[in-house]
Image (spheres, rainbow, N blue to C red):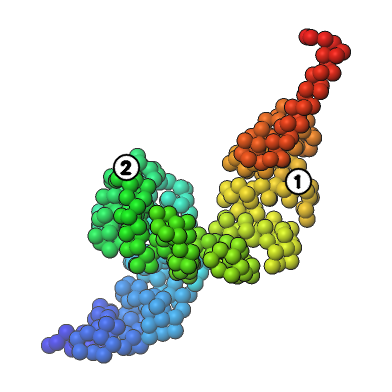
Amino acid sequence: MSLLAELERGAQEGDPIALYNLAILYARGEEGVEQDYVTAKKLLEQAAQLGQVDAEYNLGVLYDTGKGVRQDSHIALTWYEKAALHGNADAQYNLGVMYSNGEGIEQNYTLAAKWYEKAAQQGHAGAQNNLGTLYVSGNGVPRDPAAARNWYKKAAEQNFPGALNNLGYLYHLGNGVEQDFDLARTYYEKAVQLGNADALFNLGDLYREGKGVAKDFAQAKEYYEKAADQGVAEALTMLGTIYFTGEDVPQNISLAKDFFDKAAIQGNTRAQVFLGNMYKLGLGVEKNLPIAKEWFQIAAVRGNADAQFELGIMYTNGTVVAKDYRLARTWYEKAARQGNAAAEYCFALLYFNGQDVAQDYEYAKEWFEKAAQQDFPEAQYFLGHMYENGLGVKKNLQIAKDWYQMSCQNGYQNACEKVRLLADWEEVVWTGYMSIYGQP
């Protein structure tokens, strides 16, 4: 009796395993049957009703991918949950992916971590890798690079290419492990052998930076090009940057834009910001502020701090958009909370001036200080101004002078003038003292 006939007989008798395996034959078009997802779905539903866990999982896959049914992430989620609760590791992993990416459901990293861990504990390499990534970022779990390393290592031991690359990156940065460029390169090279394109990009960085290898820009560029050919957005962005700046190659703005375009379409926010600035300033393209704003908006929504800052500037100045200090403040704050010094300064300035917000010198000072700690000269200048005039702080000319001096050293000429004026004032005060009291 053929396999097909045997499965058909078992299916007629209501055997859930036979129903499931027959469904798989129809889904794949094997054993002489024509590929038929509709029939596969019906058989999977019968098997699932009899508690066949793999059938539950595969129904989730059909609805997730829209094969034989209308694509429906919510129904997919329901079937994945049934299978996951019955211990199916692939279903647990897919639930983790859906919650992590917010696919058909509200993004929830805590639930993503929960399902990844369940699958990871069963040895699912993809789940182990993704759980490691959550521990690197601190999404849904406490940030813990050491835990990330442990999960990456488990997946790497199964030759999971992404985990080998990620493990290499931990050693590249010294994140939760002792920095080791040789070991990083070893992991990258193994990942490349297994087809991981991101590792090509990371090898390029090692050669470009001369970390653990002799610095070799030509070799780095070759790795970037290989990664770019496989669609790695970071590699496309890097090549765009190289040609835009003319780093060890003839400058070619047009070619740079081509690379940025390809990376930006994939959602790379650095490439999107580059394009925004090119259209904003007319670099290699005709100046077009509305297009610049579109690129900044796209990148800002995806969390890029530089793009958020640029939108804040546009709303502050009324460039292409109506002047709106409230929206400017919103975008400045988003960027400032990511440590963007220029945004920290501009956010502080809104509170210092009371622009569409209650004037608050103390809050402004807090943000000026954050920017000043990053050597942002205008912020250092304003701190000097506040201490010179007692705005939100006790007046203190020495502290004012110190801030002005730092700002001047960082190239802000207005601060240099203040340093000279305060020095002149000190001279006047000292001369007056001497004329009255004599040498102390």
Image quarter hosting the N terminus: bottom left
Which residue ends up furthest to the front in the rendered image?
Answer: 250
Q: Is residue 247 left or right of residue 388?
A: left
**Total numbered badges shown on the rendered structure:** 2
- Which is nearer the N-term, disc 2 or disc 1? 2
Crowd class of label 2 (few under 14; some 14 to 19; many from 20; radius 10 Å): some
| Residue type, mark 2 in image | Asp
- Residue at point 72% right, 27% down? 398
Q: Closest to the observer: 84 or 144?
A: 144
Check the image and report above or below for 180 versus 4. above
Image quarter hosting the C terminus: top right
- Residue at point 61% right, 39% down? 410
Residue 280 shows in this picture: yes
Which residue ends up furthest to the left in the rendered image?
Answer: 1
- Residue at point 35% right, 63% down? 225
- Residue at point 27% right, 59% down? 192
Q: Is residue 322 left or right of residue 273?
A: right
Check the image and report above or below for 350 versus 31. above
| Residue type, mark 1 in image | Phe
Which disc, if any, is residue 180?
2
Residue tagged by mark 1?
Answer: 352
Q: Position of residue 304 (x, y in %)?
A: 55, 58
Q: Position of residue 27 (x, y in %)?
A: 29, 83
